[in-house]
Amino acid sequence: MRPALPIYNPEGEFTTLKSVIAAAQLLGVDLDSGQQAQFQRFGELIELRSKQFNLTGARTWDRIREELFIRSLRILSPAGGSVTTPEWFAGKRAIDVGTGAGIPGIVMKIALPELQITLLDSVLKKTDFLEEVVEELGLENVVVVNGRAEELGQSPAHREVYDLVIARAVAQLAELAELTIPFANIGGTVILPKGASADVEAEVDQAAAAAEILGAAPAITLQVDRPGSSPPDHMIYWMKISPTPGEFPRRVGVPHRSPLLELNG
Ligand code: SAM
């Protein structure tokens, strides 16, 4: 059984949430009081449970707010072209692959309550945490799945059924292609945020063969530097244009050991 949750009330809580509210507003999302309370509680739960097990690297309010919340909101940035305005996301069926503490999936769900989202992670403690978050925040249309992307990507319940596939900080793009593209339906979009430290151009080139084999059109990459004060992120977009061949994704661990590079593809 989970240890009981103490009431946690950081000083100046409302002040610290202001930047998240402003960030959402910049993207055209006005967070009402219920959504603000959900962000507050989500942050508290991350901070609290991070003290108990290895949930995420961002464990202080400042980092949770900036690195987890505001950077996740960047995915909604219209800088990604007119298609990725918040209106475009609302009501979509999405999956967050390797969501960890619910990043970016829970953040997107709080900001856009109409999003239907599946949160997938292979670590049971993390998916237990996500069940707790979903219950405490009263989120609807969220499915938490404990499992491996390689296996779920072959399951009829999840394969080629999502309009939107997202994954942050899970793997290099050549591997990530095989862990994400099989989930997208034809016409669906895969969006992968990458931090400033990654050599994005080289990764995109290296993953081009994999993306094509798996059914995606060539990647579009955009730099997004707002909202927030973090260094710019890159958003990589793959649109699914043809079905993923049945043999992909391969068995657990194979995409990591032997990514679909041009040489061995
Ligand atoms: N997306 C979160 C974020 O940005 O904070 C978590 C990133 S964490 C570095 C990577 C997560 O991906 C871990 O929680 C790990 O358990 C999960 N993961 C890695 N490979 C996976 C796979 N093949 N299937 C499902 N989850 C996976």
Image (cartoon, helix red, strand yellow):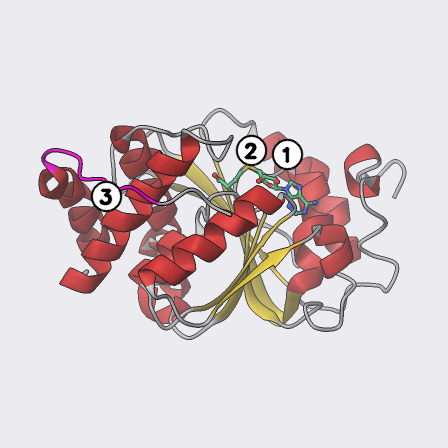
Identify which amino acid the numbered label 1 is placed on.
Glu
- Left or right: 208, with 196 as reference point: right
The vertical placement of 110 against 252, above or below, is below
Answer with the quadrant where ligand 1 appears in the image. Answer: top right
Q: Quadrant of residue 183?
A: bottom right
Q: Where is residue 228 drawn, in percent x and y?
A: 25, 37
Return the residue found at the far top.
Answer: 197
Which one is nearer the viewer's eye here, 76 or 100?
100
Disc 3 vs disc 2: which is toward the camera? 3
The vertical placement of 253 against 128, above or below, is above
Q: Where is residue 106 drawn, in percent x and y?
A: 41, 54
Span highlighted in magenta in the image: 5-12
Q: Where is residue 69 drawn, in percent x and y?
A: 32, 44
The residue that appears at 86% across and 64% down in the rendered structure is 246
Q: Secondary structure at mark 3?
A: loop
The residue that appears at 73% across and 60% down in the rendered structure is 153
- Left or right: 161, with 81 as reference point: right
**Label 3 – label 2 distance at C-alpha:** 42 Å
Q: Quadrant of residue 254?
A: top right
Identify which amino acid the numbered label 3 is placed on.
Ile
**Label 1 – label 2 distance at C-alpha:** 5 Å
Residue 7's tag is 3
The residue that appears at 13% across and 44% down in the rendered structure is 18
Identify which amino acid the numbered label 2 is placed on.
Val
The residue that appears at 79% across and 42% down in the rendered structure is 255
Does 11 appear in magenta?
yes
Determine which residue is flagged by label 2.
200
